[in-house]
Amino acid sequence: MIYYTPRFRLATLSAPQQQLCSKIGGAPRGLAADLWPRCCGGYLQKLVAQLLHQPPMLDLGDPNAVLHLFQCPKCGGANDDDTGRAAFILDRRNLGDKPSTPDGYDEPVDGGQPLIGEAFLEGFDQHDDGIPESRLPDFFDEKRLWRLHREHPEVNWFDYKSVNRFSGSPRWTGNGPGIFLGRGQFQWPNFQFLFQLGEEIWIPGQPPHPDDAGCPLFLYDENDLQRTFEPAPGKERKNAPFSISAIEGSEEWWFDYINLASDGTLFVFIDRATKPARVKWFWKR
């Protein structure tokens, strides 16, 4: 089955955003204040992602479609229902051309981050996991899913590099499909898998300096002992991730940009029967 892994670049390491583009975190571009979702007594939710239609990697059903995902900074959207999370598609022609910064958009809640860590989507890499597309329904049935795991031992089902993926099939956490299923039947019968992202985004190369990233750097040695390097005073950035991390001697690093209980994965699904298409998302460990 074909799938695509995204390539991201931290916004703090990039030129300021000048136009609408696909990204995670930060502040959305052009979103009217009255469309901004609220939760938990009126708190403005934080932008999880603002993503443009880009088939076949991200097919939103319309060339002008722009997907918006939000998460409540207080409850985290950890409920089995849709509270604490928001997802909707807007026509890009109805969006403004300036960053959206209504009062409270960057307000930290309960000591949390002012914004979800911002990173721009620069492109995709195509992969084929070797699983026939005809087996896609097996990913949504507990028994058939674990049978599929046994039939394809060559697949690293919990590979950290496969967690972040667009199109193809979902890679569930060790708890399986979870809230997507209900008593053996789909709770969301018309929804198709769109993409998923883990709490950690991996980047090739050496980690940036904490002054440049705008957040702490955690460096681990071969014994998993951690050293912490903080940005200099005044170098912190409100759109930076929680942290960046690396293993000494490794040629890759990662950033932790969102609160999904430290090791969660968010899953996004689309119902193309409506126009604009309906979108739902949830996260699980």
Image (tube, rainbow, N blue to C red):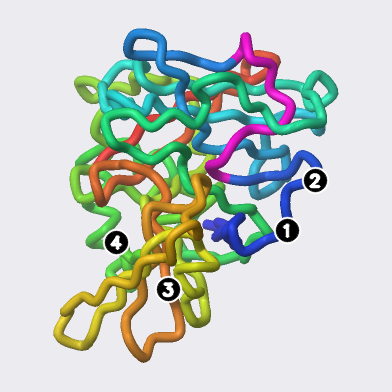
In the image, what residue type sits under mark 1? Ala
Q: Position of residue 163 (x, y in %)?
A: 40, 56
Mark 4 residue type = Phe
Horizontal side of residue 134 vs 146, given as left or right: right
Q: How many marks?
A: 4
Q: Residue at x 72, y 38 (%)?
A: 53
Of residues 6 and 262, the one drawn nearer to the viewer in this rendering: 262
Residue picked out by circle 4: 158
User: Given contact means CB atoms under 8 Å apart, are the residues at marks 2 and 1 in contact?
Assistant: yes
Residue hosting label 2: 18
Distance from the alpha carbon under mark 2 to that under mark 1? 8 Å
The reply to whether discs 2 and 3 touch (Cβ–Cβ < 8 Å) is no
- Residue under the point 60% across and 20% down: 102
Q: Earlier in the sequence, mark 1 or mark 4?
A: 1
Q: What amino acid type is highlighted by mark number 2?
A: Gln
Which quarter of the figure is the C terminus placed in?
top left
Residue type marked 3: Trp
Q: Are marks 2 and 4 in contact (CB under 8 Å)?
A: no
The x and y percentages for residue 155 are 35, 68
Question: The residue tagged with tag 1: helix, strand or loop?
Answer: loop
Residue visible at 35% across and 15% down in the picture: 83
**Crowd class of label 3 (few under 14; some 14 to 19; many from 20; radius 10 Å):** many
Callout in the foreground (1, 4): 1
In the image, residue 190 sits, relative to residue 236, either above or below, namely above
The stretch in magenta equals 24-35
Q: Quickly name the residue at label 3.
A: 253
